[in-house]
Image: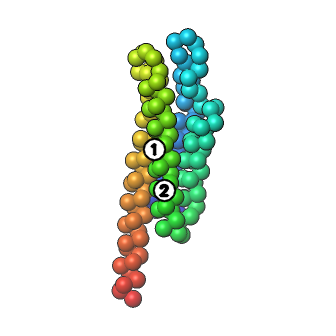
Amino acid sequence: MIQRIQTIYLVVSAIIMGALFMWFPVVLGKDGSVIMERNEPLLLGLIFVSIALAFISILSFKKRQLQFVLNRLNIISNFVLLGVFVYRLLTLSGETIVSEKGIGVLFPIISIVFLVLANKAIKRDEDLVKSVDRLR
């Protein structure tokens, strides 16, 4: 059923990643050169992969194992995105730039938390179905 709690967790995760894309700042160096922006292919691809995996996982509500695997892949893509953010922000020079523009790093972390909660709910559903099958 689509009205399960993991659907809410997945929708929140997709909304967070969409918000990351919408409000992602352009990080400029001291000399005015662009260090990171949201239209960069790597960042754009990882953000949209995360959003797409969340929606595909929502639509595959009848296949709990596939949903679980898709959420794991989504967690991995969020960790890669987080790694790209941290690497790029650590290579910047100057503390003020990192402090002002580093808030976008929190969005993948929050998304990972909601994906883990969704996986726990999927696992609970799977265990419930297995226990009912044992009783038959």
The residue depicted at 55 percent of the width and 47 percent of the height is 50
**Residue type for callout 1:** Phe
- Residue 79's tag is 1
Q: Does residue 8 appear in the picture of this structure?
A: no
**Quadrant hosting residue 129:** bottom left
Does residue 75 sit above or below 122 in this rendering? above
On-image quarter of the C terminus: bottom left
Q: Which of these two is toward me, 122 or 7?
A: 122
Residue 20 shows up from this direction: yes
Task: Judge from the rendering whether residue 70 lies leftward or rightward of residue 121; answer left or right.
Answer: right
Name the residue located 40 percent from the left edge and 17 percent from the top edge: 95
Seen in the image, is 20 located left or right of residue 98? Answer: right
User: Label 2: which residue?
Assistant: 71
From the viewer's perspective, is residue 55 above or below residue 92?
below
Q: Which quadrant of the structure image shows residue 18?
A: top right
Q: Give me the disc on residue 69.
A: none
Q: Residue furthest bottom?
A: 136
Q: Residue furthest top?
A: 31
- Residue 120 x %, y %: 38, 60
Q: Residues within 10 Å of mark 2 (few under 14, many from 20)?
A: many
